Image (tube, coloured by chain):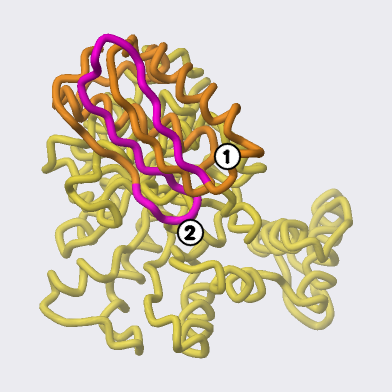
Amino acid sequence: MEILKPAIAGTLESSDCMVTVEPGMGDVRLELESAVIRQFGPQIRKVIAETLERLGVNNVNIHVVDKGALDCTIKARIEAAVFRSNDINKNIPWGGAVK
Amino acid sequence: MNPAENPNKKRLRRSMMFLNAQKPGLIKDPYVYGPDSIMLDLEDAVAMKEKDAARFSLYHALQEIDYRGVERVVRINGLDSDMWEEDILCSVAGGCDSIRIPKTETAEDVKKVEAVVEEAEKRFGREPGSVLIMAALESAKGVLNALEICQASPRLFGIALSGGDYTKDLQTVITGTGVELMGARQHMIIAARAAGVQCFDTVWTNLNDMEGFRKDVQTIKAMGFDGKSIINPRQIPIVHEIYTPTQKEIIFAEKVVREIDEKSAQGIGVFTVDGKMIDIAFYDGAKRTLMLARAAGVYKGDL
C-alpha cells in the first residue's frame, strides 16, 4: 500500500503505542521511542518491519512511541494508521495482509 | 456443526464483563479476574473516530491473546449503522465465540446478523455453526418482542436487558430500586425460558453502592436469570458468590438427584426428602445447583 497522507493511530496510554505514518522518501524510515528499548527494541523493530511488509508498505516515514504495548497492539496501531492514510475502513483483508 | 447443538450454547455465564476493545490495557489480561465471559465492545465504549482502530485492536487480541477459556463475545455496532457487517467479519475472522447484537427489536434483526455470521464462517474457514449470537433488548419494542427474538435463530444462546436505553425509552430513569425494570425482567425471563435460551440482566453502574449491587444480583438470581452484565472486575466475586449454592443446598440437591434416580427406577413418582415433597419436577433444578456448585469449585462429586 502507498501512504497517501499523514495518519495517526493509538494513544500514549500505558500498554498502548502511538503510530504516525507519512509518505516516505523512497524507503522505510523508522523512528522508535520506547522506555523498554534496551530490552525489547529489536523485537519491536521486527514486529514493525513484518507488519509493514505484510501491508506492502515500502515507502514511509514511521514514528512509533511505545508505552509497553504487546506485539498485537503494535500491529493493530500500524495497520490502523496505514489504512487511515488511505481512507479505508471497509473490506479490510482480515486474515490476509492483516494477520 | 448444527448450531442448536453447539455445546457452548448452554455454558455457564454468571458474569459477562464489558471491555472497551480499543483499550489495550483493558483487553490484554482480563481473564485474571475470572469472569465467565468478556464482552469486547465495538459499540458505545468506542468513540466514532476510533471505530476503525478498535477493529484492528480487537482482531489481533482475539488472534494472539490466550483468554484461558473465558468466553469472548463481541458487541458489534447497531444494525442502523454502516459498521456492523465489517464488525462481524473482523470478529469472526479473529476467532470470537459469540456476537452480541445491540438494540435488537425484531426476529428479523437476528436473522440479518445470522446471515452475515454464516457467510463470515465460510469466508474465514471457521467451523460452520461455531459462532453464537446473543441479543440485547434496549427498547419497549424489543422487550415486547422477546419471544420472537429468542426463537429467531438456532445460534441464539440468550437475551440481555440493557437497562439504560430501555428506561430512556420508557421515559423514566434507573432508580436503584429495580421498580422500573420489573416488567421487562419478568417478561424477558419468561420468554427466554419458553424458548429454551439464557437470560442476562443489565449492568449496575454505581460502583460506590456495592450493597445495592448485591441486592440487585440477589433479585435477578431469584427471578431465574442466568447471570449479569458487569462493568468492573470488583463486581465479579459478588456475582459468583451469590450464584454459588450453599453447602446445605448442595447436600439437598445431591439427595434429590440420587432419590429421583433410585425411586423412578422403582416406579415411584412422588416421595419426600428431608420432609419436603419431591417429584421429577425438581430434577433439573437440583442438577443445575450441582453444576453451579461445581463451577464455583465447592462441589467435587460426580452427580
Judge by depth and name the residue closer to the eye, B212 or B66. B66
Residues marked 2 and 1, same chain: no
Q: As displayed, is residue B254 above or below residue B274?
A: above
| Residue, disc 1 | A37
As helix, strand or loop, the secondary structure at mark 1 comes to helix
Query: What label sits on residue A75 in the rendered view?
Result: none
Judge by depth and name the residue closer to the eye, B169 or B247. B169
Which chain wears orange?
A
Q: As displayed, is residue B227 above or below residue B40?
A: below
What's the residue at 35%, 57% (across, down)?
A: B191
Please, what is the three-letter code of the amino acid marked with disc 1? Ile
Q: Quadrant of residue B116?
A: top left
Q: Give percent across and percent down for residue B16.
A: 49, 57
What's the residue at 59%, 27% (across, down)?
A: A42
Residue B128 in view here = no
Q: Which residues are magenta?
A: A11-34
Judge by depth and name the residue closer to the eye, B257 or B130. B130
Q: Give percent across and percent down for residue A96.
A: 39, 12
Q: What chain does badge 1 belong to?
A: A
Query: What label sits on residue B17 in the rendered view?
Result: 2
Answer left or right for A59 relative to B131. left
In this view, the mark in front (2 or 1): 1
Q: Give percent across and percent down for residue B64.
A: 56, 31
Which chain wears yellow?
B
C-alpha distance separating marks 2 and 1: 34 Å
Q: As displayed, is residue B126 above or below residue B197?
A: above
